[in-house]
């Protein structure tokens, strides 16, 4: 029941990471601070469209 989601950089809008989440438990969009190789720094990544 886990779905694959993409994490999009809030700064440059690039799709940098793919992960899974259980949509029955977590209904809101995922937000994680991760390293962006294009921006060369840690930036907030939000769940984007697949």
Image (tube, helix red, strand yellow):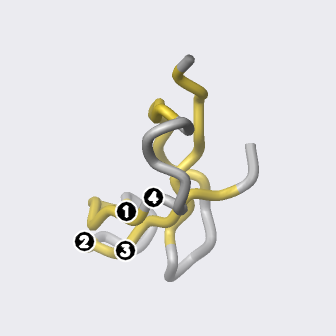
Camera-nearest label, 3 or 1: 3
Instruction: Report crowding for label 4: few under 14, some 14 to 19, many 20 or more residues within 10 A (C-alpha).
Output: some
Q: CA distance from mark 3 to mark 1?
A: 9 Å
Which residue is labeled 1 in the image?
A: 36
- Labels 2 and 3 touching (C-beta < 8 A): no
- The disc, 1 or 2, on the residue closer to the chain's N-terminal end is 1
- Labels 3 and 1 touching (C-beta < 8 A): no
Foreground of the two, 24 or 17: 24
Q: CA distance from mark 4 to mark 3?
A: 10 Å
Q: CA distance from mark 2 to mark 3?
A: 7 Å
Q: CA distance from mark 2 to mark 4?
A: 16 Å
- Labels 1 and 2 touching (C-beta < 8 A): yes
Instruction: Report crowding for label 2: few under 14, some 14 to 19, many 20 or more residues within 10 A (C-alpha).
Output: few
As drawn, the label of residue 5 is none
In this view, 18 is above or below 33: above
Camera-nearest label, 1 or 4: 4
- The disc, 4 or 3, on the residue closer to the chain's N-terminal end is 4
Foreground of the two, 22 or 41: 22
Which residue is labeled 2 in the image?
A: 42
As drawn, the label of residue 44 is 3
- Labels 2 and 4 touching (C-beta < 8 A): no
Q: Position of residue 34 (x, y in %)?
A: 28, 60
Which residue is labeled 4 in the image?
A: 30
In percent of the image, x 45 and y 48: which residue is there?
26
- The disc, 1 or 4, on the residue closer to the chain's N-terminal end is 4
Q: Position of residue 25 (x, y in %)?
A: 44, 40
Is 5 placed left or right of 20 in the picture? Answer: right
- The disc, 3 or 1, on the residue closer to the chain's N-terminal end is 1
């Amino acid at each position: 029941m886990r779905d694959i989601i993409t994490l999009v950089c809030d700064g440059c809008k690039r799709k940098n990471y793919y992960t899974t989440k259980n949509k029955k438990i977590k209904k809101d969009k995922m937000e994680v601070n991760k390293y962006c190789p294009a921006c060369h720094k840690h930036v907030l990544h939000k769940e984007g469209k697949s």
